[in-house]
Amino acid sequence: MTTKTSRLADENNTLREQLTPDNKKYYEDLLLYMRTRAVLKDSAVIEQELLTILTDIIAAQQDGVAAVDYFGKQPQETADDILAEIPNHWVNMVKMVGALLAGYFLITAIPSLTLPSTPVDIGTLLLTGVYFTLAALGIVTYVGRTTYQKQHQWGRWGWVVRWLAACVLIAPGFLLTFFLKTPWRIYLPGLIGIALISILLIALAGSFWRLD
């Protein structure tokens, strides 16, 4: 997340506290829907649009107009219209996925990089990293698609069912980690492994700082 995007998100969080409970619920559903449906969009543009909507709701609230009366009972349609006007930002998507994969590689490879007798299985790391990234994107997409759908009458069991479904979705990734072996293995002496960790940390920090 860039400095601009972070600044807009922080301003959004501060201003949101001015909303009444009903308006806050209305807006936060809209915010969740737009953020989760805009994975391929420019995050800074999305945050600017959300901030504009928020300031409009606050202005209407000061005039005694509720958000649902100002924007209507179908905020999903308004959000879809806004998202349709914002072009896809594929470079941003590639950078984000690359940063996620690099972070996963760094976390899972550290033990192997510091122990010269333990090989680093590049193939397994790559395949499991891709799987977990796709699973995460799938979960985010699901959250976006169901934000405005009527909830089934599961009561508190609904959260249990969703939690179990998420566990089932990510379980194959852990199975791949423990049982998949590929011929793409390398051995690194301890000092080289530590140096590689340092390089990866610097590269990963730079990727997240410049992510746009």
Image (cartoon, helix red, strand yellow):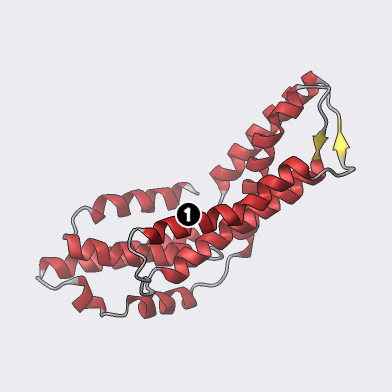
Is there any visible trace of residue 64 in the rendered image? Answer: yes
- From the image, which quarter does the C terminus lie in? bottom right
Q: Is residue 120 above or below residue 15?
A: above
Residue furthest top as drawn:
191
Residue positioned most to the left: 64
**Is 27 situated left or right of 8 in this image?**
left
Residue 123, horizontal then vertical, whole percent: 81, 46
Of 17 and 118, which appears nearest the observer? 118
Vertically, is 48 above or below 171?
A: below
Q: In this view of the protein, which residue sits in the foreground, 45 or 153?
A: 153
Would you say 43 lies left or right of 113 here?
left
Q: Which residue is mark 1?
A: 163
* The quadrant where residue 104 appears: top right
Q: Is residue 205 above or below residue 152?
A: above
Residue 132 percent across, percent down from the top left? 64, 51
The quadrant where residue 109 appears: top right
Residue 95 visible somewhere in the drawing: no
Q: Position of residue 83 (x, y in %)?
A: 46, 73
Which element carries disc 1, helix, strand or loop? helix
How far across and how far down the image is residue 138, in percent?
57, 62
Number of residue marks: 1
Query: Closer to the camera, 186 or 34?
Result: 186
Q: Residue at x 26, y 77 (%)?
A: 71
Within 10 angstroms of label 1, few (less than 14), some, or many (20 or more) residues?
A: few
Q: Is residue 146 left or right of residue 69?
A: right
The amino acid pointed to by label 1 is Trp
Residue at 81% x, 26% y is 118
Residue drawn at point x = 69 percent, y = 48 percent: 129
Residue name at image x 46 percent, y 71 percent: 145
